[in-house]
Image (spheres, rainbow, N blue to C red):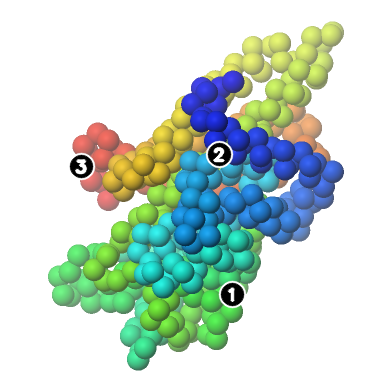
Amino acid sequence: MTGGEALLSDELRMVRTTVEELLRRLEPKREEYYRQIFDEVEYPQELWDKAAELGLLGALIPEQYGGTGMGLLPLTVAVETFASHALGNTMVMLTAMDTAAILEAGTEEQKQRWLPAIARGQRCLAFAITEPDAGTNTFRIRTLARRDGDGYRLNGQKAWITGVDRAQSVLVVARTLSYEEVQRRGLPRSAGLGLFFVDPRAPGVTLQEMDTVGIEGFRQYFVFFDDVFVPAEDRLGSDEQGLTPLFAALNVERILTAALCLGMTEYALRAAAAYAKERKVFDDTPIGAYQAVQHPLARLAVLHEAARLLTYRAAKAYDDGVPGREVGLHAAMAKYLASEVTFDAFDRAIQTHGGNGFVKGYHLIQMLAPARLFKTAPINNEMLLNYIAEHALGLPRSY
């Protein structure tokens, strides 16, 4: 039992056991799932439905809205467990982060309207913040939502939007005041930022698939908004609430990204260790007996455990209602370390397998790009180090 496992309560062990039992029952379909994910770029709907049946999609949602109310830490454990079988589901993470924003800033009517369907798995959500000319610097986004009668008119463009073709709604971050207007009026950079739920099939919304790799089972898109009408009741939060719901969503995103990385690392290390115990090159000695093979894997096992403890700490802080800035620091550390380790783990697993590491049937080479992606997205690790330097060490702001 690892240190992370030892810290789990009986309830959390039950979550892990329940997911493991589900995946054992589905074992005969495993290769078909991999074919869909890696070859067809299509995440199996059955796995989404099973996650809903287990109550995982309602983990953040209170029982009064149809959820289980288990919290983020149980969901973190579940996401990690799916990913440890190379079945990580990015849309669970995106739906959870949007759910956190609803819980933070939604009206009672919005919660009643949206949360029960999310908990049942009937409402899958995407998230749209990044633009071609505004990636890390959210304040510079140009997508505008101008007031029009009893709603808003949305115009602009988003990029690298994952799974929007599978989603029933996408939470769009847009400006109600242009950045230039904010500067002219001497307002804070965060002034005029709003969140809007948009139907990706609404008139005026155009999806253009991007030619990318890196998200297991999902595609990424340019999303164009051409005078899209958004009813006022689909705006989340108000001007007075500022970026509070956005930060709540981003903390959940980073924690669950770390959970995906933890599971992927476990998959890579398990595969490497199993192969190293069986593969023999010289005499009858398995290559796992050689320190050149052992030591890199052992080092990664240590870092994996450290990343797991950081991630669980961040999730528990969120569940305990710790102030958002403190949760954000834990989340930044967890995402940084977990993503660094998972890329190194797949690189080392492929090296351990030698030529077989490039054989698709081992399912390692297909996961190298997703492992590398998490060092860049949903936020690059350099920006996380900037944040950690400022908030953990008190160093001057560098950006």
Q: Residues within 10 Å of mark 3 (few under 14, many from 20)?
A: few
Q: Which callout, 2 or 1, points to the residue nearer the camera?
A: 2
Residue 199 picture quarter: bottom right
Can residue 396 be seen by looking at this rendering?
yes
Residue 77, labelled with which disc?
A: 2
Residue 207, labelled with which disc?
A: 1
The residue tagged with tag 3: helix, strand or loop? loop
Q: CA distance from mark 3 to mark 1?
A: 40 Å
Q: Residue visible at 43% across and 76% down? A: 234
Pick whichever, 325 or 388, lies toward us: 325
Q: Residue visible at 55% across and 31% down? A: 10
Q: Are marks 3 and 2 in contact (CB under 8 Å)?
A: no
Residue 272 picture quarter: top right
Can residue 31 be seen by looking at this rendering?
no
On the image, numbered disc 3 is attached to which residue?
396
Q: What's under tag 2, amino acid-wise?
A: Val
Q: Residues within 10 Å of mark 1 (few under 14, many from 20)?
A: some
Q: CA distance from mark 3 to mark 2?
A: 35 Å
User: Of the residues under marks 3 and 1, which one precedes in the sequence?
Assistant: 1
